[in-house]
Amino acid sequence: MDYFIRELTPPEPASARDGEAWRLLEGFRDIVNSGYAATYGEGRLLETSQRILAGWTMPGPVTSRLFLAFPSGDGRDAGEHPVAAAKLMVSPRDSPTHAYPHVVVDAPARRRGIGTFVAAHLEELARADGRTSLQAWVEHPTPGGERVAAPTGHGSVSAADPAARFLWKTGWELGQIERISELRLPVSAESLLAHMEAAAARAGDDYRVLTWEGESDPAHLDDLARLNGDMSVDAPAGELEVDEEHWDAERVAQLERRALASGATFLNAAVLHLPSGRLVAQSMLQLDLDDTTRPAQQDNTLVTSTHRGRRLGMLVKAANLEQLADRYPECTGVFTWNAEENAHMLRVNEALGFTALAPEGGWQKRLS
Ligand SMILES: CC(C)(COP(=O)(O)OP(=O)(O)OC[C@H]1O[C@@H](n2cnc3c(N)ncnc32)[C@H](O)[C@@H]1OP(=O)(O)O)[C@@H](O)C(=O)NCCC(=O)NCCS
């Protein structure tokens, strides 16, 4: 059978009349969500149309193009039932040489060459746009069996994992493994408090924890921008070529506006260094407001390099989990993604009760 690819255009948010564009967007969402289920559990991590639309259409450093693949043919059903969803992202200011493709083939349609067909289309577009390298983060839920180690020496993927086999066959290299972990909630309030008190005692009197939900106080935006910029280069990247991200106060505010427009809320915990008046640590959680029982997603956690070794990482994470339990006690979990070589962050997470779900591979393909 032959297939064709159709690029999506954003539906008008306020108009239910833009029926065709909404239908395509929902088809895209459903294929992406069925792909998540294998790793995160049925319905635990979900894209919503609102979130896809906000990420796609609102101003921000990353721009995305969305595609669906359909079986060709002139039957009545032609163009009705998509078999694959794909996205091509670029971040021109931060990473002028990279493009970030992602392909999900609907499970019943796999192993028919559709993934290869769609990936080749994205690669062609990236080349035509002058990109010289592709990068992708891909979940590898296949357990056990023969393992292939990451070049960092930390973490591995199953040699039989379909996505890993697909990527090896199409010329990609594995650069790093992140561990996807989940904390099932609720956790005991006493144990969280004990972690916070122990960390605060170790940190000493120079530090104070602040927590808030939603948009940040404009007075904090410069510090948050600095922490985000540090995060882009301080987090271990293995063999992946990673460029420093350019952050300023407006970019932080823009990120927050995008998150809120996508139907999410976010919870921040930060540590204020009293002698300097600067924020020196931050941890952020995002939560979809359409169903707050679904697990929250951990965003950045970072301690400024000159303030490390004082348990501030544990302090901000535990404080934010406490804030989550106070504001959204119905939330059933937190997902987080950490480099396997990031021993300090993993130790904090394990102490808080996070357990590993699956590896996620950071892959790169150089375009010659
Ligand atoms: C990875 C994925 C996109 C592959 O799509 P697909 O349409 O099944 O892939 P293709 O049919 O084009 O397969 C191409 C090659 O990949 C390898 N491959 C794909 N699935 C495989 C499997 N289940 N077992 C072993 N090898 C597999 C094979 O080498 C295959 O070639 P062959 O059939 O001639 O042996 C699909 O499994 C998927 O959507 N997974 C979930 C989302 C994901 O991980 N996406 C990552 C890509 S960015």
Image (cartoon, rainbow, N blue to C red):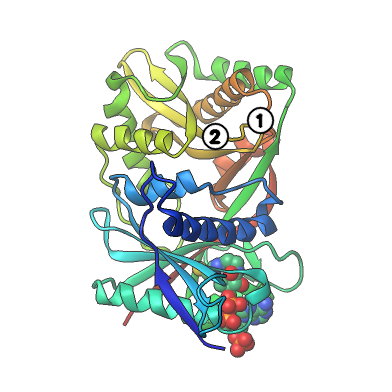
Residue 309, how many percent across, how many down? 49, 30
The answer, for residue 42, to whether it is visible in the render is yes
Residue 287 bears which disc, if any?
2
Asked whether mark 1 and ligand 1 are closer than 8 Å, the reply comes as no
The residue that disc 1 covers is 331
Res 126 quadrant in image: bottom left
Asked whether mark 2 and ligand 1 are closer than 8 Å, the reply comes as no
**Where is 84 relative to 117, above or below?**
above
Query: Residue shown at 57%/35% (left/top)?
Result: 290
Secondary element under disc 2, as helix, strand or loop, is strand
Query: Residue shown at 54%/70% (left/top)?
Result: 80
Q: Quadrant of ligand 1?
A: bottom right
Query: Residue shown at 67%/36% (left/top)?
Result: 333
Query: Residue shown at 58%/43% (left/top)?
Result: 336
Q: Quadrant of the N terminus?
A: bottom right
**Where is 223 relative to 244, above or below?**
above
Report the front residue among 291 and 330: 291
Sequence-first disc among 2 and 1: 2
For disc 1, the neighbor class at 10 Å (few under 14, some 14 to 19, many from 20) is some
> Which residue reaches farthest bottom?
1
**Where is 225 relative to 208, above or below?**
below
The amino acid on which the numbered mark 1 sits, given as a three-letter code, is Cys
Q: Quadrant of the C terminus?
A: bottom left
135 to the left or right of 40: left
